[in-house]
Each structure stands twice: as structure tokens, then as C-alpha cells.
Amino acid sequence: MKSLLTLLFLGFAGLAAAQTPVAPAVTTATLDNGQPVLLVDAACGQCRLGLPGKSCDLAIRMNEKAYFVDGTDIDSHGDAHAKDGFCNSVRKAQVQGKVVDNRFKATYFQLVPETVSAK
């Protein structure tokens, strides 16, 4: 009986731990003070920025051109399908990196916090 109670307790503890929300990562790598930080639009390339494909992939828009991003992915920055997620909104991000073979190779990527408008 004692072992059954212990087993039940461990099972419930495991369920509670599995449902604890984890804060999404918002930064990729570290800021290089020797490189410029660019402010860009970030969103799902297919859903919001008009790039080809059938899945949801992180992309940025800079200088009026969209690029898929390497070095971080869409799921590293929260739920892409949430109200403020990349598939439903275009967000601002600070980035460092360069375009190689028509893709943005990010060495730094951080979302800019959204501001709440006063009513």
C-alpha cells in the first residue's frame, strides 16, 4: 500500500512538472558590439511575408526584402500560432548577421517587447 501511494505521488508530481510553462527563448547567441544591430520586421515567412513554402518558418524583412532565417527558428520565440505569434503578427526584432545565399544567417536575434497602448 505504501509503495502504491508513493507511485501515485510521483505520478502526480510528474504531471505537475510537465505542465509548468517554460519561458520561450528570445535571444540567439550574444550581442557583438563590433557589429551593427539592425531593427527588422520578423514573422512567419509563408504566413506573413509572402515567401514560398508550405510550413511555417521564421523570416525577417529588411530593406523591403524578405529572407528566411538560419541560426534560430520560429518555435524558439513562443507559440507561432498565438495571437501575437509570428504566424499572426509581424513583430520587430533586433538582429545581427548577414545575408548568404539569399538567407539571413543570424548571429544575434532578439524580439523587441511589444508596447501596450494606453486607452
Image: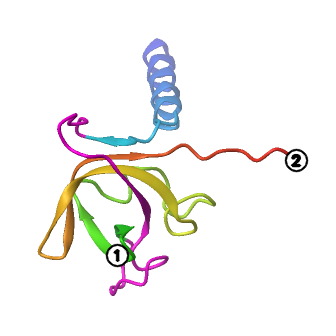
**Which residue is found at the position 48% from the left and 61% from the top?**
80
Left or right position of 8 against 70: right
Judge the density around disc 2: few (<14), some (14-19), many (≥20) Cα neighbours within 10 Å.
few
* Above or below, 119 relative to 55: above
Does the segment drawn in magenta span residue 40? yes
**Which residue is found at the position 48% from the left and 78% from the top?**
47
Mark 1 lies on residue: 66
- Splitting the image into 4 quarters, where does residue 70 fall? bottom left
**Which residue is found at the position 49% from the left and 25% from the top?**
13
Segment colored magenta: 29-56
Query: Residue pushed farthest right?
Result: 119
Judge the density around disc 1: few (<14), some (14-19), many (≥20) Cα neighbours within 10 Å.
many
* Above or below, 72 relative to 34: below
Does the segment drawn in magenta span residue 72? no
Q: Where is residue 109 in the image (x, y as percent from the top left)?
A: 32, 48
Left or right position of 60 against 99: right
* Above or below, 6 relative to 55: above
Q: Which amino acid does label 1 sit on?
A: Ala
Q: Is residue 54 visible?
A: yes
Q: Position of residue 21 (x, y in %)?
A: 52, 36
Q: Which of 23 and 99 is in front in this view?
A: 99
Q: Position of residue 42 (x, y in %)?
A: 43, 62
- Of callouts 2 and 1, the N-terminal one: 1
Which dot marks residue 116?
Answer: none
Q: Which of 37 and 77 is in front in this view?
A: 37
Q: Which amino acid does label 2 sit on?
A: Lys
- Splitting the image into 4 quarters, where does residue 30 fall? top left
Disc 2 and disc 1: Cα gap in Å?
Answer: 33 Å
- Splitting the image into 4 quarters, where does residue 115 fall? top right
Query: Residue pushed farthest left?
Result: 101
Mark 2 lies on residue: 119
Label 2 sits on a secondary structure element that is loop
